[in-house]
Structures are given as structure tokens and as C-alpha cells.
Amino acid sequence: MYKIGVIGEKDAVLGFIALGFSVFPVENSEQASETLKKLAEDRYAVIYITEQTAAGIEQETDMFRESRFPAVIPIPGIQGSQGIGIKGIKKCVEKAVGADILFRE
């Protein structure tokens, strides 16, 4: 059976316990990287990661962009959105369509 996990700052992720998700508070990029790799090996299908945490481990999160599992999804933390999630969507759309049809900056 697949599981859902949440990685990020303690204040941002503890609320996900009420939804039945596995929660993994981290304090730095090294812990976040190790936790992400552990969850990927431990049959987690979806891993939500706060944008602030994802910003420190972009290379690790990019490793899973092409794989079927786990889906690594950035979510806003308690400081609000940094635009990392939107940036990832923009990259995927540009790759699929061949042009920026969403934002046209």
C-alpha cells in the first residue's frame, strides 16, 4: 500500500497529522535530503514538501520529476508561497507543449 508524507518546517507540517499523513519535520537541507530519499525508498507515492524546504534541495527533488513514484509536490509553508510550485508547473507545461502558454513573461 502506498503512503503520503509531508516534509518541512515543524510548524508547517504538524497539521497534516490530522489528515492521516506521515509527517517529517526537518530543520535543515541535509535532513530534508535524507528524509526525501528515505521516503522514496519506503514506498511513498506522494511526498508534499514545503517550498522553503524544497528550495534548499532542488537537485534532489528534480531527480524525481521524471519518475512515476513518488510524486514530489511543493506546497506553501507558513511564510507563504515562494512561487516554486508554479515554477515547476511552468517547466512541465513548457516541456509538454514546447512554449510558455501559461504566463508569457
Image (spheres, rainbow, N blue to C red):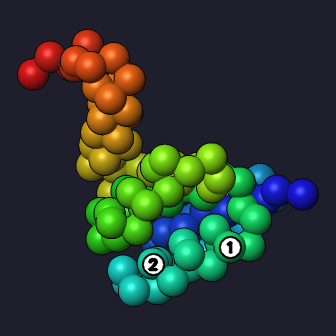
In percent of the image, x 46 and y 49: which residue is there?
65
Q: Residue furthest top?
A: 101
Q: Which mark is residue 33?
A: 2
Mark 2 or mark 1: which is in front? 1
> Measured along the vertical axis of the image, is residue 87 above or below residue 32?
above
Q: In the figure, is residue 95 to the left or right of 1?
A: left
Q: Quadrant of the N terminus?
A: bottom right
Residue 85 got which mark?
none
Going by the numbered disc 2, the residue's amino acid type is: Ser
| Outermost residue toward the right in this view | 1
Residue 78 visible here: no
Whether 39 is drawn above or below 74: the answer is below
Neighbour tally class for label 2: few under 14, some 14-19, many 20 plus, Cα within 10 Å: many
Residue 53 percent across, percent down from the top left = 38, 68
Q: Position of residue 86 (x, y in %)?
A: 33, 36
Residue annotated with mark 1: 41
Identify which residue is drawn at 82% across, 56% down.
2
Q: Residue at x 14, y 16 (%)?
A: 104
- Picture quadrant of residue 39: bottom right
